[in-house]
Amino acid sequence: MLTYYGESLASYGFGRGHPFGPDRLDAFWREMTRQGLDRKTGLGTPVSCAEQDLARFHTGDYIARVQHQSQTGEGFLDHGDTPAFPGVFEAGSVVVGSVLDGLKNILAGRCQRVFVPIAGLHHARRDSAAGFCVFNDIGVLIEALRQRHGIQRVAYVDIDAHHGDGVFYSFEDDPDLIFADIHEDGRYLYPGTGAASETGKGKAKGTKLNLPLEPGADDAAFHRVWPRVEEFVRASKPEFIILQAGADSIAGDPITHMRFTPAAHAHAATRLCALADEFCQGRIIAMGGGGYNRANLAAAWSGVVEAMLAA
């Protein structure tokens, strides 16, 4: 297994005081070190991606706009949640590049499992930023799996408190993208989407599973719906699995209202690794996603790594 850690990956953050600050990676790594997990996992070195990698998912006009605002460091990349900063293009490119490097290592047989803590930027659309997410590394990964490696049937599972709208709507009519998302009901939380009735469009109808939960949903609520996720993924017989393990669904996050514990995240990782072993030659990439309480994200992400190591 490889876990990605390095200063360039930490550079994806919007300044101290912002919920998505650059200190999130070190908060995670301190807990990894405290538990001795840093000595049990292989270490992946963050790398940048090429502009052509971004273009697998994002429009050329949007990429150019991020490049421009990365030079000026001024304004917002969306309607007010995602500020530009000097070097934001390079920082976002390292997130995507590290995920793609993880894929390269998996497909080369150097490992079966990868965890990238600063990744899982599931709100970015093909032509815009949103919700602290500049480039959608998940979308780029899915397109790279298809276009470069001929891996078509991909299962994406998201347990972040926020609905993964940037992934959902970009692949809403794609029957080979199996999408399962446990999140806080959009009536109470950004981005306001992900109703249970949203199951895909056209030939993809029924390939998307949205499981909105009420504010305050705890581990008991998680375990009530989790078997549906497993059954859904199992029925699809995926070739590759992606987990977005956002820690903002844990009790005490400053911007959400859910009450999971890190045990939910570890359980999701354990069970998805088992499905990856059954259907995908063990191939799974997990991403840290959201999480703005530093103690929560450190515990949850370390739990994911520990579960992936043990699975």
Image (cartoon, rainbow, N blue to C red):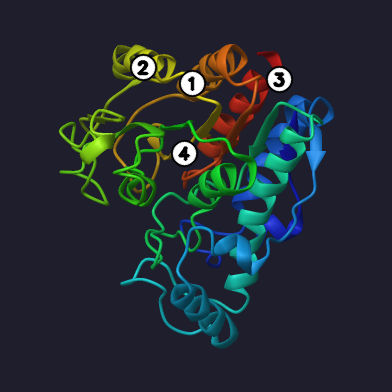
Q: How far apart are marks 3 and 2 (CA)?
A: 21 Å
Q: Distance between the residues labelled 3 and 4?
A: 19 Å
Is residue 201 in view from this perspective? no
Secondary structure at badge 2 equals helix
- Please provide percent x and percent y for residue 254: 38, 47
Q: Are marks 1 and 3 in contact (CB under 8 Å)?
A: no
Among the two numbered marks 3 and 2 on one chain, the one whose residue lies closer to the N terminus? 2
Q: In this view, does 300 lie to the left or right of 218?
A: right
Q: Quadrant of the C terminus?
A: top right
Among the two numbered marks 2 and 1 on one chain, the one whose residue lies closer to the N terminus? 2
Q: What residue did someone put label 1 on? A: 268
Q: Quadrant of residue 11?
A: bottom right
Residue at 65 percent across and 20 percent down: it is: 282
Residue at 48 percent across and 50 percent down: it is: 139
Q: What residue did someone put label 2 on? A: 226
Q: Are marks 3 and 4 in contact (CB under 8 Å)?
A: no
What amino acid is found at the position of numbered circle 3 in the picture?
A: Leu
Q: Are marks 2 and 1 in contact (CB under 8 Å)?
A: yes
Q: What residue did someone put label 3 on? A: 309
Residue 30 lies, with reference to residue 17, above or below; the image says above
Q: In which quarter of the image is residue 103?
A: top right
Q: Distance between the residues labelled 4 and 1?
A: 11 Å
Q: What residue did someone put label 4 on? A: 246
